[in-house]
Image: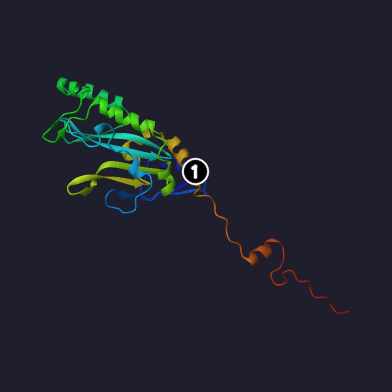
Amino acid sequence: MKIVSPFKDYYDCMQKYGQDESLTYIRSPEKFKYYQDKDFIPGTTDIKWGFGGVNYCNCDWAYFNTIVIGFCGKVYPIVEVNLTISYPYKTKYIVKTKDLDDFVVENLNKRQIEKYFNNKKPKYNYGISSGATHKNINFFFEKFKERENDFESIFIAKRCPIFVGIHSDPEHYIRGRKMPTITFNGMLNKYHFFRIVPTETAYQEIQMYLGGVLGVGNPSIPEVSNEDLIEAKGFDLKKSFRKPKQKNK
């Protein structure tokens, strides 16, 4: 598979091991903005960005955002954790609940740890949500795991193997509020997707999904002129199928 793109991603390196020239992935990003773009893509509004109340909430050590990666017919949830306990601020991408559990235990104080593992209903104080709990984050991962195969229509509608959905995109504001976006043919490396699908597997799955499910990139049948057909059959272009002239006796 040959990849044509304005950016590099983590699985691109697999091209050096040989390419199937008959299959080309035109990886051209296209961002779709909710509540602004008029042409809604079938199925995109059905992605429940707010599972577990961690779509975009704050606590005293981080603020959170949720991301959904669409990859070859399935969806994978990721939690973006923007840490405020260090300077400069750091961002972590969590692909399973245990990753965040371990971080909390290793880096936070006793009060913060207790609050995180507290499974009571979130309280709201001066607009700051305490919804960033183990229970809510785990719920987010579990719900998308249950529905990972339910969004095939999105891939088919756009005929692409990848999309990146962001619940609160800092590049898409409406009335001072960050709004959801979905980018087709987006970059995966930024969100540490290689921890979910390894490099070689990602390349192979994209190749099979493009050529199989989407049926794109297959070699086209070239148009052949009449002259080329005549020559291919071994005939002369001047004489074609006519009988040669007979000499007079």
Between 139 and 227, the one nearer to me in the picture: 139
Say whether residue 195 is visible: no
Q: Position of residue 124 (x, y in %)?
A: 15, 31
Residue at 24% across, 45% down: 179
Say whether residue 137 is visible: yes
Q: Is residue 8 left or right of residue 24?
A: left
Q: Position of residue 5 (x, y in %)?
A: 39, 50
Numbered circles on residues, count: 1
Between 64 and 229, the one nearer to me in the picture: 64
Dividing the picture into quarters, in which one does residue 182 lie? top left
Image vertical order of residue 38 relative to residue 135, above or below? below
Residue at 16% across, 22% down: 109
Q: Residue furthest bottom?
A: 248
Q: To which residue does mark 1 refer?
A: 213
Which quarter of the image is occupied by the C terminus? Answer: bottom right
Between 214 and 241, the one nearer to me in the picture: 214
